[in-house]
Image: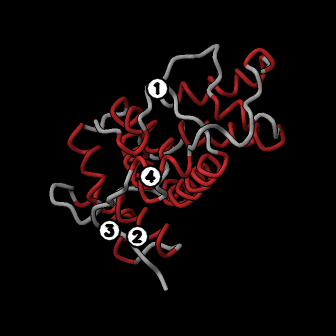
């Protein structure tokens, strides 16, 4: 039976982060100096799509993933395809935030609170994601984006009503990209939560607010 969460998500951030971040990663990140130029090029291409500057210090998540190079490279390529895809950045980040929240994913939520604001989400909109598609204040299309995430995670499919609203503004490429994107960010949440990827100093996880 499907379980679609359309309302406010209440999470005990400290308890959840003790569970999925813990005292340290289950897989030790590769030392930064052992990451090669090709890997940095892939990471910085994804960062550029997210509106972030290049880095010479690869994030812990990437340095963990690089230990499985056959997965690391296509994961970075897919990340680049999604960050530079057909869905507008603001709508992309709206969807990823709700995805991170529904997955109770501290790393994903905290990072995308920052990214979402760079991509045009207002503080009010970022914080309203906590209240889901049933919250007052969304326009019809934003509500459908949020509702679409809730349906995909709760029912593994979009309803006819949500599809109709999304298809009123998105073309076929965007409609194909949307469920693919949500599936990708659910998978990332699984990996980050399971491997207990450390939060960056600026990332306070599920307690992050705009």
Which residue corresponds to mark 4? Answer: 15
**Residue 51's disc number:** 1
Specify the quadrant that holds the C terminus: top left
Which callout, 3 or 1, points at the residue further toward the start of the chain?
A: 3
Calculate the distance from the C-alpha at mark 1 to the C-alpha at mark 4. 31 Å
Question: In the rendering, at what x and y percent does residue 201 appear?
Answer: 48, 25
Q: Is residue 87 above or below residue 153?
A: above
Q: Are marks 1 and 2 in contact (CB under 8 Å)?
A: no
Which callout, 3 or 4, points at the residue further toward the start of the chain?
A: 3
Which element type, helix, strand or loop, lies under badge 4? Answer: helix
Residue at 46 percent across and 26 percent down: it is 51
Which element type, helix, strand or loop, lies under badge 3? Answer: loop
Q: Nearer the viewer, residue 208 or 126?
A: 208
Question: In the rendering, at what x and y percent does residue 162 appear?
Answer: 36, 70
Calculate the distance from the C-alpha at mark 2 to the C-alpha at mark 3. 16 Å
Residue at 53 percent across and 61 percent down: it is 179
Which callout, 1 or 4, points at the residue further toward the start of the chain?
A: 4
Residue at 28 percent across and 63 percent down: it is 133
Which residue corresponds to mark 3? Answer: 6
> As drawn, is 75 to the left or to the right of 208?
right
Which callout, 1 or 2, points at the residue further toward the start of the chain?
A: 1
Disc 1: CA contacts within 10 A as few (<14), some (14-19) or many (>=20)? some
Q: Quadrant of residue 149?
A: bottom left
């Amino acid at each position: 039976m499907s379980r679609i969460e359309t309302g406010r998500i209440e999470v005990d951030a400290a308890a959840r982060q003790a569970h999925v971040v813990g005292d340290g990663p289950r897989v030790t990140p590769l030392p930064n100096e052992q990451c090669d130029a090709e890997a940095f090029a892939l990471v910085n291409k994804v960062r550029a799509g997210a509106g972030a500057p290049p880095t010479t210090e690869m994030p812990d998540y990437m340095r963990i993933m690089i230990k499985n190079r056959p997965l690391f490279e296509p994961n970075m390529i897919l990340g680049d395809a999604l960050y530079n895809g057909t869905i507008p950045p603001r709508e992309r980040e709206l969807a990823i935030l709700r995805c991170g929240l529904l997955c109770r994913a501290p790393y994903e939520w905290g990072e995308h609170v920052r990214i979402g604001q760079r991509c045009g989400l207002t503080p009010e909109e970022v914080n309203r994601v906590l209240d889901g598609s049933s919250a007052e204040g969304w326009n019809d299309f934003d509500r459908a984006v949020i509702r679409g995430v809730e349906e995909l995670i709760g029912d593994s499919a979009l309803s006819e009503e949500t599809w109709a609203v999304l298809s009123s503004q998105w073309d076929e490429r965007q409609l194909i990209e949307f469920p693919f994107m949500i599936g990708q960010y659910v998978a990332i949440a699984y990996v980050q939560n399971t491997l207990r990827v450390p939060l960056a100093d600026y990332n306070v996880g599920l307690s992050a607010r705009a």
